[in-house]
Structures are given as C-alpha cells and as structure tokens.
Image (cartoon, helix red, strand yellow):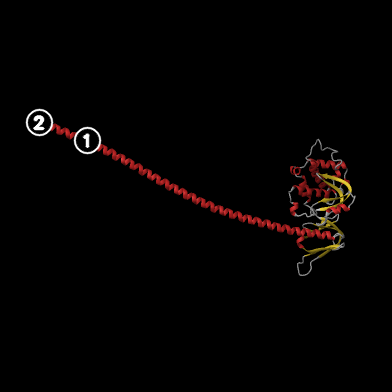
Amino acid sequence: MVFPVSSIGVCVTSCGTCILVVCAVEHPLRGDAAVLPIVQAWGGNTRARLVFVVKLFMDSVRASSDAAMVHLLYIQSVYNVITGIYPTSTDDAVSLASLQMQEKFGSHNTDVHVRGYLSHQLKGLVPAPLYPRKAPSTWESSILERHSQLNDEAKAAPALLYSRILQTREYFGCAFFPVTQSCFQELQEAVLVGITSFGIYIFEEHSKATQKRFALKDIYRWGFHPEESFYFELKSASPGSGPYFEFPTVEGSFASDLLTDYAHQMLREMELNKAQESTAAQEATAAEAAAAAASKAEAAALMEANRQRAAAMRLQSLFRGFKVRDDLHKQFAVTRMQAAARGYLARCLFERMIEQLEAELMAEDDE
C-alpha cells in the first residue's frame, strides 16, 4: 500500500535498504490513484516521499514467515515504536532496541560493541517520547548490555521477534483516527478510533489503552458523513435498530473505507480457504481412489502371482512324477534285461551239461 509522507527532515534510523524518517504519514492513496501525477504535483518538494507499507493486517499477514513480509512488518514496527505511535515502557524500549541492534549490526562483539559505538545511533533506537528521560550514555549502556544477553532465537530472527512482541498488543496494526466523542459518558471526550482486522477499538488518546472493542462480526453497518463524522451501528438482538455510535471527524471516509476493505478481505480469505479446503478434499478423494485402485491392482497382481505359482508347482509336481516313473521304468527294464541274460546263460550251461551227459552215456554203450 502506498502512503504519502511529509517529512520534517530528521533521519532517525536505517535498516538495510529502507530508511525510517520522523515524519507525518498521511492517508493511503486510493487503489485507482495514479502515483506519478501525485509525485509530479509536489514539484520541487524533494522532502516528500511515497512509502510502501502494509495496509491490512490480516491474521495471515501477521503469521507470515515470508522474508519480505517479515522485513516489511519489522520496518513498520520500528517506525511506530521510534515515533511513539506505539507506546512502550522503558524496559520494553531497551529490549526492542537490542533486537533492532542485532538485526542491524549482528551478534554482540565485546571488541566492537563498546561504549560510544551507539552514540550516533541512539535516536534511531530509542522512542522519541522516552529519549529525554535518560542520559544518552545510560541508554547506550542498557542497550549494549541487553544486546549481549540475547538468546539464540533472538540472534537468529531479531526482525521477526521484534514485530511478534508488538503483535501481543491490541493496538498493533491499527489505523488510528483522533476523534471527539459523546457516545460513552464514562470516557474522555478526545479518544482514538482504531480500525483493524478485529473490527473497531476505542483507545485512550495517549496510552492507547483499550477502552471499548467492537468485533466486525457484530457490526451491522458503518459509513461516514463527508468531512463531518464516522459512524457505525451494531447488530440488534431484537427487532429494530441496534446501538448507534457517531464520532465527529473529517477523516470519516478513510475510516469507513478501511473497515470496508477489511470486510472484503475477510470474505476473500474465507472464499480462498473454502477453495483450498475443496481442493484438499478433492485431492484426498483422488488419493483414496488411487489407493483403492492401487489396492485392487495389487490384489489382482497377487492373485495372478499365486496362480502362476500354483501352475509352476503343478508343473514341477508333474515333472517330478514323470521323472520317478521314468526312473522306475528304466530300472525295471534293466532288471528284466539282467534276468533274461542270466536265464539265457543258465539255459546254455544246462544244455551243455545235458550234451555232456549224453556224450558220456554213448561212450559207455560203445564199450
């Protein structure tokens, strides 16, 4: 999202390729706005800038681990802390500054990170509203000491941890609109209306302590009167109109448009989630069908393998039976041949014995 920035010219810090400046950030350009004509309209005013920032702090944005998104959230968080938009205690300011130092300069080095190292960096590390409360040397000592005590998680992902710490606070990601109010008698007249993905907050003007909150799902309608006010109406638990709240402000159109953008984005994400769930369900069904088909194919393959194994076993059995029978036939044939040969030899011997006896008898008769 593009925001026009009117700088007052005091550079407070730089992180990578981005430079944070103490400045007055105006409202975001509308989606159909052309950037070039706006820049050209500034003429020679080189102190005016366009910066890109996150506009809709959806849960998906807050939870993102994408490096570009983490860096963008970090840069905006640093800007909001340093300029005092996000109020912090002195101890929190030191902790956040130590993470910022880790992101910018790396892990603590006792030979490098010594007294005087941050002397020209302090205004880019310490929130402007808190800076006058301590001497620069005291701020520096506290930050260096806390930097030396960072654990492994903080050393590995200081930018991510920086914004995650701030995300625990309800005002994180809010667009603030200063208004006067007479709707709530128990509250001060000057308050801040905060617009975020949750819905609408009413904050105390300086501490940004939450005084009222209205979830987007409970809001029936909202809108604005040009250059006059911003209003919203809650859903009614009974027939008729629900509670109606109106806040005089010339920025009503911006507050109304931002709330509308959040509502539309929530619907888009719901549709996206449904589409993703539908796709996941279709993929799961396809996977189940594929698994079932694979199971059928495996069963068929197993049955075929069993059939082939059974056929092979039958063939082997037939072959073994044939081999046994063939061996028996051969053995029987050899036995018969041996018996026939022995019988023939015995008959020959017997015939020779008969012939010999006949010869002997004939010889005796001749005598």
User: Where does the image place residue 174, in percent across and percent down from the top left?
Assistant: 81, 55
Q: Quadrant of residue 263?
A: bottom right
Q: Is residue 137 above or below residue 63?
A: above
- For mark 1, what is the residue? 348
Q: Three-letter amino acid code at disc 2?
A: Asp
Label 2 sits on a secondary structure element that is helix
Q: Is residue 311 left or right of residue 349?
A: right
Whether residue 88 is visible here, answered yes or no, is: no
Q: Residues within 10 Å of mark 2 (few under 14, many from 20)?
A: few
Residue sitting farthest toward the right: 44
Where's the C terminus, which quadrant? Answer: top left
Q: Is residue 314 left or right of residue 186?
A: left
User: Where does the image place residue 97, in percent across and percent down from the top left?
Assistant: 82, 45
Q: Three-letter amino acid code at disc 1?
A: Cys
Residue sitting farthest toward the bottom: 239
Q: Quadrant of residue 333?
A: top left
Residue drawn 54% across the image and 54% down it: 296
Q: Nearer the viewer, residue 68 or 60?
A: 68
Q: Is residue 266 left or right of residue 229?
A: left
Question: Which label's residue is closer to the chain start, 1 or 2?
Answer: 1
User: Where does the image place residue 239, in percent across and percent down from the top left?
Assistant: 76, 70
Q: Which mark is residue 238?
A: none
- For mark 2, what is the residue? 366
Label 1 sits on a secondary structure element that is helix
